[in-house]
Image (cartoon, coloured by chain):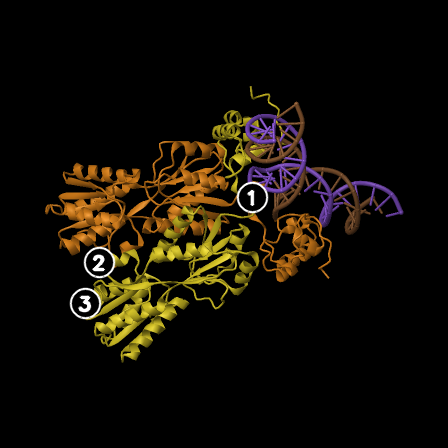
Chain colours: A yellow, B orange, C brown, D purple
Amino acid sequence: MHTGALIIGRDRPRGSGIDDRKLNPMAKSFVTSIDVAERAGVSRSAVSRTFTAGASVSPDVRQRVLKAAQELGYRVNRLAQTLNTSSSNLVGVVGANLSSPFIAKQLDMLSLGLLRRGQQCLLLNAADARSDIAPLIELIFEFRARAIVVLSGEPPASIVDECLANGVKLIVINRLMTRPDTDVILSDDILGARLAAERLLAARCRKVAVVCSGSLTPTQVRRATTFSEAIREHGGEVVRWSEGPTAYETGVAAAHALLADEQIDGAFCVTDLMAIGFLDAARHDLHRCVPDDLSVIGFDDIPQSAWKAYDLTTVGQSFSVLTDAVLAALDHDDGEVSTQMVPVTLIERGTARK
Amino acid sequence: MHTGALIIGRDRPRGSGIDDRKLNPMAKSFVTSIDVAERAGVSRSAVSRTFTAGASVSPDVRQRVLKAAQELGYRVNRLAQTLNTSSSNLVGVVGANLSSPFIAKQLDMLSLGLLRRGQQCLLLNAADARSDIAPLIELIFEFRARAIVVLSGEPPASIVDECLANGVKLIVINRLMTRPDTDVILSDDILGARLAAERLLAARCRKVAVVCSGSLTPTQVRRATTFSEAIREHGGEVVRWSEGPTAYETGVAAAHALLADEQIDGAFCVTDLMAIGFLDAARHDLHRCVPDDLSVIGFDDIPQSAWKAYDLTTVGQSFSVLTDAVLAALDHDDGEVSTQMVPVTLIERGTARK
DNA sequence: AACTCCATTGCACACGTGTTCAATGTTGCA
DNA sequence: TGCAACATTGAACACGTGTGCAATGGAGTT
């Protein structure tokens, strides 16, 4: 009988495990290693060792412990575990506009990669691209995460210092940090912008538009300026637009504003999402014929760009390479910092004149 | 001078706080309340109370503690905090295909809502829609989350039992659970399917296709069968397709397979993503004219459906209502279970003949 | 048989926090 | 001034786990 069993090692006895749950369904607390130890008739250490790889436990004890744990529904408390070993498996991920295709794809692959590596993903939504992400990173600190991945927004210098001081790996994607002590992953904006420019020149464009959003991220600026320079070098004319959020609607607005000028025969949108909006407005609202009298090129190669209605020619960066770069950065030992460049290629589809 | 100060309350002295960090940049461990207490010249209890709302601290002590905490960069350790108070702010979120527009949008709003409520989001990516999510939920248990939100996949019965036994709130979206002891949030599939059927009948369709994916989720089945019944009631003919993943490509494949039959003059795709693929293939590959000789209706109202190239008539469910329902379910006290229905409306656009 | 070596086991401590309890100082009132 | 009521403070314990250390016991060797 378990009912009269002596309760040891616990001040507020909660009964003897599973029986307790059956008798009193309101006892909503998790099973601990003490409960398992009692039931298996061993010490708590034996339980801990059973669930620790490489610890010394006899087969007999191990089996008894596993049986008891199974019966009681025991699960190691990761919080207590982390508290003790002080190495959490949590990775904080900060991002805004999680439903925009580019970010969503990144998050999808990143969270999957982390899971496969045995790490967990603490997701903080920054709501707006221009909102301050410092409080979110503070929150990640509180959870003692060992690494932080920033998908959008730029961490202030004070945060970078804190990360350094506490040994937290900080990985920033597509934000050129002025500081050399942060892991940075960049798409090859320079090459990408040049490829786009060359392609539009090959399409015999004379006057081209470059479309950015109003949130002038370093990446967008780099793409736009490099592109503009390359076009002008070859005698082309460039008109620049930068307003609004990085969204479909911004592409639409840009098209309406820019294509009033009928001389414009080419456009480079620094983001596929804006390119798609631009394309839609050009075709359906302004009745331009793409690619015959207007060539459009995007950047990112989001899934929607391959959809038949768009068939967007774009500068693609491999999401898997990008994700691998993040995961690789996580592996670097403390202090080791790297800047990784994600290669890009021109993906030839149907929106740039041959 | 701090260098010779007596270290109290700590067995492995790590120096006296900030000086330590400057002298030895390799000391990568977080500042604790003990460090703050030392610097402020108070007991550790005072520090804890300073950071606990409603605790009794004199203004003088509070200020000294805050100053010391600020200088040292102290942050409460949520893991230890949770361990003690046993009420974690973590909410586990399980989902597959995080980059598909519908899921991404849900995740975006949910993570934002949780953050605003002071709860954190532990994200587990289930990779594939048909993969077993039980191990992921186990993981969430290990983190002692108080609630689990399942965006896709169906938790096995054993998991439901565990949640019940441990007082973990389990919220399932768009999966009709056979068990009455789970919180369920459902879109109004029945009404939505009827609206779609009525609209296609109003478009004078005689032979219609209904397109599902191969992963026959309860939601998809309910939409498809209700729709089919409604059409047949009015003497219409229905052809059904269910193969492949819930993706754009599946819509394309369905169109290719079904539209060989030239009599088909209407289609209900149980998901917008498939509807968009269907639409694209119908127009660009099969040269059907939508909506003149083919009407198409979708379900979900993802952002892409409003894009000009598609302008998809669809059955919309409000994402904000859905998110609010999830957050409301989190508020229910233990034991209280609810089934919430998310209302739907027909969103009239341009793919169904007038 | 005596001894050494080694695997196994339990005790006790540490991780960083919240909170009870008793002690202390302080204020208000008669 | 004396007393009660009260605010503040620190010591001690609990939360659930991993692990160093010493003790135990068995197997193998001489």
B41 horizontally vs B285: left or right:
right
Q: Check residue A309 in the rendering and tell me which mark sits there, or answer none.
A: 2
Of residues A309 and B27, the one drawn nearer to the viewer in this rendering: B27
Residue B214 in which image quadrant:
top left
Residue B138, given in percent of the width and then of the height, sits at 44, 38
**Which amino acid lies under the numbered mark 3 shown in the image of this protein?**
Cys
Q: Check residue A92 in the rendering and tell me which mark sits there, or answer none.
A: none
Regarding residue B311, the answer to whether it shows in the image is yes
Answer yes or no: are tags 2 and 1 on the same subunit.
no
**Which amino acid lies under the numbered mark 1 shown in the image of this protein?**
Thr
Question: Marks 3/2: CA distance?
Answer: 13 Å
Q: Residue at x 19, y 46 (%)?
A: B254
Question: For the residue labelled by badge 1, is the local secondary structure a helix, a strand or a loop?
Answer: helix
3 or 2: tag closer to the N-terminus: 3
**Residues packed near mark 2 inside 10 Å, few (<14), some (14 to 19) or many (20 plus):** many
**D15 in relation to B309, above or below:** above
Of residues D12 and A25, the one drawn nearer to the viewer in this rendering: D12
Residue D15, given in percent of the width and then of the height, sits at 59, 38
Question: For the residue labelled by badge 3, is the local secondary structure a helix, a strand or a loop?
Answer: loop
Question: Marks 1/3: CA distance?
Answer: 61 Å
Question: Marks 2/1: CA distance?
Answer: 51 Å
Q: Chain of mark 1?
A: B
Residue A7 in which image quadrant:
top right
Q: Residue at x 35, y 32 (%)?
A: B178
Question: For the residue labelled by badge 2, is the local secondary structure a helix, a strand or a loop?
Answer: loop
Residue corresponding to mark 3:
A289
**Which amino acid lies under the numbered mark 2 shown in the image of this protein?**
Ala
